[in-house]
Image (spheres, rainbow, N blue to C red):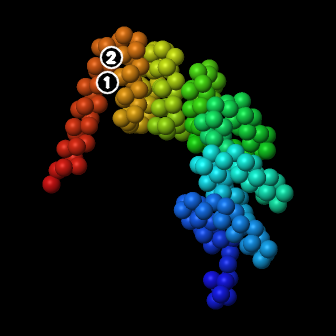
Amino acid sequence: MLEKGVRITVYSMTLVINELCKRGGVEKAKTLMGEMAGRGIEANVYTYNTLTKAYIERQDFGGVTEVLSLMKTNRVDSNVATYSLLIDWYGSSEKIEDAEKLFDEMRERGIEPDVYVYTSIINWNCRAGNMKRALFLFDDMTQRGLVPNDHTYGALINGACKAGQMEMVGILVNEMQSKGIAVNRVVYNTLIDGYCRKGMMDEAQRFRVTWKRKAWRLMSLLTAP
C-alpha cells in the first residue's frame, strides 16, 4: 500500500496490527504503530485495545503498562472494551481490588459498564467468595436495564455452589429458566458437583438425568437426515 501510494487509514493500520498480534508479532505491531504515527496516522482506542489484548494474552504486565502509558501520553481515552479487558485481566490475576477500582473509575468517568463488564466483575467476585458483592452488582446491573446472560447466571451459580448456598442456587436456576435462558453443559456440571458436595444426591441425580436427556435430544437433531 505504501509503495503504490494507497492512502492508509487508522482502520487499515489496526487490521494489520491485529493480524500481526494474532501471529505472535506483538512487538512488530507496536513498532508499526510508532512508524505510522510518524507518517501522521495516529492510533485510536481500537488500535490500543488490540495491543492491550495481545499483551494480556502473553501475560506481559510491562507491555500492558506501556500501552496504557502511550494512550495517556497521546490523549486517547479508554472505552468500555478497554476497561473490560483490564478488569478481566486483574480478576484472573486475583487482583480483585484493582479490578473494582477500575470498575469505579469507569463509572466516575461517565462510561457505563455493559453486561460483559458486569459479568466479568461478578464472576471474579464469585470466584473470590465475595457473594454479597456479586449479588449487589447483579441487582445494580438489572436495575440499570441490562439483561443478564447465561455467563452471568453461570458465574453466580458457580459462586453459590462453592459457598454451599444451594437454596440460592435453586432460585437462580429457576430465574434463569423463567427468562428463557438455556442451562448449558457447564452450568449442569456445576450444579451436579455442587449438590454432590452438599450430599444432596437426589438433586444431583435429577440434574444429571435432565442433562443426559437434553444432550440426547441435541444429538438426535444433529444426526437427523
**Along the viewing direction, whichever of 27 and 1 lies nearer the viewer:** 27
What's the mark number on residue 203?
2
Vertical side of 124 occupied by 76: above or below: below
Please determine whether, in this image, residue 3 is positioned above or below residue 116.
below
Q: Which residue is mark 1?
A: 207
Q: Quadrant of residue 175?
A: top left
Residue 67, numbered circle: none
The percent coordinates of residue 225 (x first, y second) are: 15, 54
Amino acid marked by disc 1: Phe
Comparing 149 with 117, the one in front is 117
In which image quadrant can residue 2 be found? bottom right
Element at badge 2? helix
In the image, taking residue 141 as reference, residue 202 lies left or right, namely left
Please state if 87 lies on the left or on the right of 190 as rendered. right
Which quarter of the figure has residue 119? top right
Q: Residue at x 33, y 16 (%)?
A: 203
Tags 2 and 1 in contact by the CB under 8 Å rule?
yes
Q: Residue at left 60%, top 62%?
A: 25
Binning the other alpha carbons within 10 Å of mark 1 as few (below 14), some (14 to 19) or many (20 upward) gives some
Other residues around mark 2 within 10 Å, as few (<14) / some (14–19) / many (≥20): some
Secondary structure beneath dot 1 equals helix
Q: Is residue 223 left or right of residue 120?
A: left
